[in-house]
Amino acid sequence: MLNKCEIREFRNSDLEAISHIYNYYVRNGFAAYAENELEADIFKGIIMAAISCYVLEIDREVGGYAILRNYLPYVNFKHTGKLTYFIKNSQL
């Protein structure tokens, strides 16, 4: 059976699920680069400062997300960006 997948813009209701995905990678590896887990309100600030944030929805559940941010604030980097994405681990 095929799963129903959709890529859509971030909604505030996604915040808890994507912070759980991110914090899984903080606890279990080095992909997130962070030393400590982030609270949902801090994560929301990161998303609001980003250029865009999209969510992968699988069968009406958040299965991952991607955030596009400015690479550096300097003028000579104004056409560069940093894309970060995380996919939900099956253990979540």
Image (cartoon, helix red, strand yellow):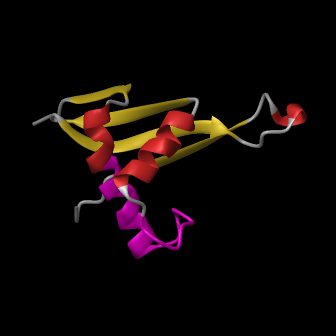
Residue 61 at what x, y percent from top left? 19, 40
Is the residue 32 above or below the residue 69 in the image?
Answer: below
Say which quarter of the image contains residue 59.
top left
In this rendered view, identify the residue nearer to me: 89 or 38: 38
Question: Residue pushed farthest right?
Answer: 76
Residue at the spot x=27%, y=49% of the render?
Answer: 16
**Image label count:** 0
Residue 69 at what x, y percent from top left? 62, 38
In the rendered image, is residue 86 in sight? no
Q: Quarter of the image containing the N terminus?
A: top left
Residue at the spot x=32%, y=43% of the render?
Answer: 15
Residue 26 at what x, y percent from top left? 44, 68
Say which quarter of the image contains residue 14.
top left
In this rendered view, identify the residue nearer to me: 88 or 13: 13
Question: Residue pushed farthest left?
Answer: 1
In the rendered image, is residue 23 in sight? yes
Is the residue 44 above or below the residue 54 in the image?
Answer: below
Is residue 39 one of those drawn in magenta?
Answer: no
Residue at the spot x=76%, y=34% of the render?
Answer: 80
Residue 65 at what x, y percent from top left? 40, 41
| Image-based side of 41 in relation to 68, left or right | left
| Image-based side of 51 in relation to 38, left or right | right
Is residue 27 one of those drawn in magenta?
Answer: yes
Is the residue 33 above or below the residue 88 in the image?
Answer: below
Q: Quarter of the image containing the C terminus?
A: bottom left
> Which residues make up the magenta segment?
18-37
Residue at the spot x=50%, y=35% of the render?
Answer: 48
